[in-house]
Amino acid sequence: LTIPHEYQGTRRSREEESGRTMGNLPSMPTQLSEEEERSVLDYDVSVKGIAALIKQCAENKERRVVIMAGAGISVSAGIPDFRSPGTGLYDNLQKYNLPQAEAIFDIDYFQETPEAFCALAKEMWPDNFKPTPTHHFIKLLEDKGVLMRCYTQNIDTLERAAGISSDKVVEAHGSFAEAHCIKCKAEYPQKWVRSQIMQDIIPRCIECTTPAGGVGVGGYTPSAGGESRCGGLVKPDIVFFGENLPQRFHELRKGDLNQAKVLIVIGTSLSVAPFADLIHDAGDLCARLLINMNQVGGRDHAGKGFRFDCHDNYRDAALLGPCDDAVRALCDELGWRDELEALITKGNGDGDDLEDLEGGAGGAGGAAEVAAAEAEAGAAAAVADERKAKTAMAVGFAAWKNAASDTPQAVPPPPAAVRPPAAPAAAAAKGLTEVKMTKNWRKPPPVLPPLRPLGPAEAGGGGGDDEEDIDTPAGLAANWTLELVEPTDRAEVMGGRPAYFSLGGLPSWLLDEDEAEEKETGDDAAAELARSREYHFIALMPAGSKLPEEKTDRDYPFREEGAETPATPDRLRLRIPWVRGGLTLPYDFQIWYCNGQADEVVARWGPLTVDANAPEDPQEEEQQQSNIEEDDIEGIAEALAPQLGMPVEAVIAMLRSQMNNRGEGEGEGEGATFLIMAAAPGESPGGSASSSPAPPIPPALP
């Protein structure tokens, strides 16, 4: 009998339940060939290399650049971000007497106490802010014909103000541009909502008394007939806690990122999902550039994230520094600096005389004009100080879902509003050097330590604490041992079964947490290992592997959190995969000791030869066959009834009987039991397409 495909895989296997992703070797993530990796940046994993790729897109008129923008791109407009200590939004909310900082963006709290958000909205309404140079850079990408989409966390609408086409912008966390009643979903214009908030009136879905076709207060136009509204709260279309992201975000993300040739991540901490997950949607041949004050989004233990300074990095580069300086440096490399400055000048409305600068910023004859522009920018900043109380509370419009602390902090003096300068100084972008532009973020392939045999230490060997003067991790591990403890006979190691190993010869400062803390203050190889102790792991590797990322399974000797029975160096579990699916027996593995923090192989042992796969486990097979959820029974029964020639009610009773009998775990039940095999649509239960006659159907049960 064939379970409909929509019900297959509704329950995870025991390996998945335990957090492991072990399986047959061919199911591991595919590794790109060297030719495929070179096709991205030819291993020139630098800002210059990615700039060349962007320029190539412009020459070929390919719209294949995707932007991910966060709060950092709006900071120079006078809009503080959320997380900066002292100046961030969450550090400035104490006066609203919130139970916790992020409550001001919580939909449940808003429904109970809308006054807090409306008071904040009055201060942060995006009327008096202008796009930053980074916003104009995104507009320039569109003008050059390379921008596919700009995904932004910001709700300040400055992307729109910069002139970026609406079809190119995805406001992942919504914006102030539209508003709706949270109860009946009636739409209200921004002008009307603003008028209510500025008058300290809580916007509510009003009872319409304006004649049909007329225009009400603030431009609100009632629907035909003038029917009454529900009185619910009207909220700008900002995504609060407890609300879904816009449907457009989900509709476009996969297609855009799969087609992208370059992904530029600007001014975000990448700490708010699902927005942060966009970097994982990028195709394997998409180059990725991070522009940010700090390096974020690095690869986690699951292998996801940027591969900065890793051996297998073929596409991820970073340009660290202020966003505006970074995009100017990037435009210098692209040869687009003059066009960027023209957009900035036009966008800031600083006079026609500046729009006609010859040679752009820093060009011949432009020094006087640049000086005048800087003087004007300074005067504008002085005027802006008068509204600093308003701009201090302006929203950073980005990672507001990720509060740094649940406890509101003391309110510091508000920062002065900063207007983006009309034109940059003639000097090069601050803090960005040629070294940053040319740095190759690909680490040279590692030199693997020698392969040592499994088993106890040879006579005269052994570890201990007498290795203080050895200056490499591999040297420190020269006398470490790895011994198979279960099964004790190597011939009993089989595919599809776990094996257990014991590490020996480790120094006491690695085994003892307190000693490790004392040791980690140094600057030698021992201190490096002590500091990274939590990230050490042993990995089962196919023979011939070059990098620890090509893992099949791993276990951590010193990590204890979240485990009922923490692993120890004396008993480390590795699941040996089934050797099949194109692989042949005997098959050789190696076991590596790796420092995951430094992406370094410290020691290797092997070979561990698998001569046979374990026999099928009837109990495990039976459990997989009976993985049917109670909620799915009715749907499965409806699909199986025609195959059995039985009423749906009888099939439901049969399935429940099967579940009960197997759940008892004691032999055969008194009722009939049926073997239900999962198969794809159009396939026989055996797993392959079949044109043979169906087996005879057993008689219907009463």
Image (cartoon, rainbow, N blue to C red):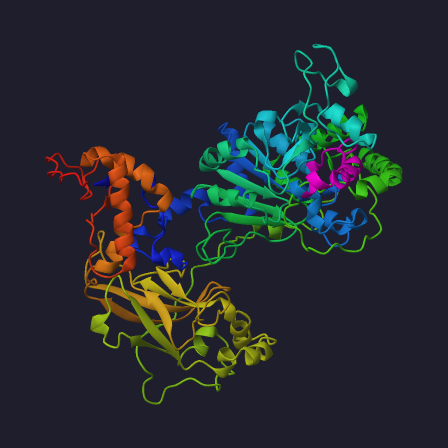
Q: Residue at x 40, y 79 (%)?
A: 478
Across the whole image, how many numbered discs are drawn on residues? 0
Residue 415 as seen in the image, left or right of residue 247: right
Q: Residue furthest bottom?
A: 460
Residue 506 as seen in the image, left or right of residue 297: left
Residue 514 as seen in the image, left or right of residue 670: right
Q: How far across and how far down the image is residue 459, in percent?
A: 32, 89
Quadrant where the N terminus sits is: top left
What segment is highlighted magenta in the picture?
109-133
The answer to whether residue 681 shows anywhere in this view is: no
State the predominant SS element of the stretch in magenta.
helix
Q: Is residue 308 above or below residue 466?
A: above
Q: Residue at x 74, y 39 (%)?
A: 117
Q: Is residue 252 above or below residue 532?
A: above
Quadrant where the C terminus sits is: top left
Foreground residue among 74 and 241: 241
Q: Is residue 455 above or below residue 270?
A: below
Q: How far across and how far down the image is residue 418, in percent?
A: 80, 41
Query: In which image quadrant can residue 695 be found?
Result: top left
Foreground residue among 504 and 38: 504
Q: Residue at x 30, y 56 (%)?
A: 663
The answer to whether residue 174 shows anywhere in this view is: yes
Q: Is residue 476 magenta?
A: no
Q: How far across and how far down the image is residue 123, in percent?
A: 80, 38
Q: How far across and how far down the image is residue 108, in percent?
A: 65, 42
